[in-house]
Image: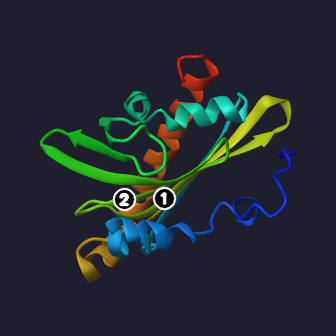
Amino acid sequence: MPEPRPAGDRAADRTPLDPPGDEAASAAQAGLGDAVQPGAGEVTATVIVNAPAARVFAALLDWERQSDWIPFTRVRLVAGDGGEGSSVEAVTQVGPAVLRDEMRVVKVDRPYEIRVVHYGKVLRGPGVMRCTPMDGDRTQVVWHEWFHLPAGAAGKVAWPVLWPGSKVSLIQALRRFARLVETGELP
């Protein structure tokens, strides 16, 4: 059973699949443009971690340690302290293929939610990682992304082919994350 949230907390009223709302205006003012709007490419992954929400949240917010659980990816904090307003870069490389993901942290609601906006040339759109406390010091983690599909109509046609791989990769990354938190290797 989830821990009660403070009354009037809008984040507590959202379901895990609700796209970003209020923070879109403040993110747009920060120069992120249309990247704050949800794109047509949605992907969601969920995992249960056998650890308290505060510890799980701290591990998610340790941006550079994401390199330990996201395959082929190096993550670094470009600016800020990792909290709201910080810039993060994730570079994924498989052989000669390189994908650079630039994101800004637009909201941190400890220990429940981290919201980002991906604003790079290829990866654009909002994302959220949510921690929901459960009985027995367990935590449900939901990671949801709403990417703009690159290449216009071709991107929309390719998405049904790419989506299963994206979802599988995200699930595998979260499972590895859970193992590292549960064994005490993270945070």
In which quadrant will I find the C terminus?
Answer: top right
Please state the total of marks drawn on the protein image. Answer: 2
- Horizontal arrangement in the rendering, residue 72 relative to residue 136 (left or right): left
- Horizontal arrangement in the rendering, residue 168 relative to residue 35 (left or right): right
Q: Point out residue 23 in the picture as x, y percentages from the top left corner.
A: 53, 66
Query: Quick check: marks 2 and 1 in contact, CB under 8 Å?
Result: yes
Indicate the amino acid at tag 2: His
Q: Whole-Å distance between the Cαs marked 2 and 1?
A: 7 Å
Residue in the image at 36% along x and 59% along y: 118
Residue 148 visible in the displayed image: no
| Upstream in sequence: badge 2 or badge 1 | 2
Mark 2, Cα crowd under 10 Å, few <14 / some 14-19 / many 20+, is many
Q: Point out residue 94 in the picture as x, y percentages from the top left corner.
A: 22, 40
In which quadrant will I find the N terminus?
Answer: top right
Residue in the image at 39% along x and 54% along y: 104
Vertical position of residue 175 compared to residue 86: above or below: above
Q: Point out residue 185 in the picture as x, y percentages from the top left corner.
A: 53, 17
Vertical position of residue 158 compared to residue 73: above or below: below
Vertical position of residue 38 compared to residue 81: above or below: below
- Horizontal arrangement in the rendering, residue 129 relative to residue 31 (left or right): right
- Mark on residue 127? 1
Q: Point out residue 164 in the picture as x, y percentages from the top left corner.
A: 44, 58
Residue in the image at 71% along x and 28% along y: 50
Rendered image quadrant of residue 151: bottom left
Residue on which the image places disc 2: 118
- Horizontal arrangement in the rendering, residue 156 relative to residue 6 (left or right): left
Indicate the amino acid at tag 1: Gly
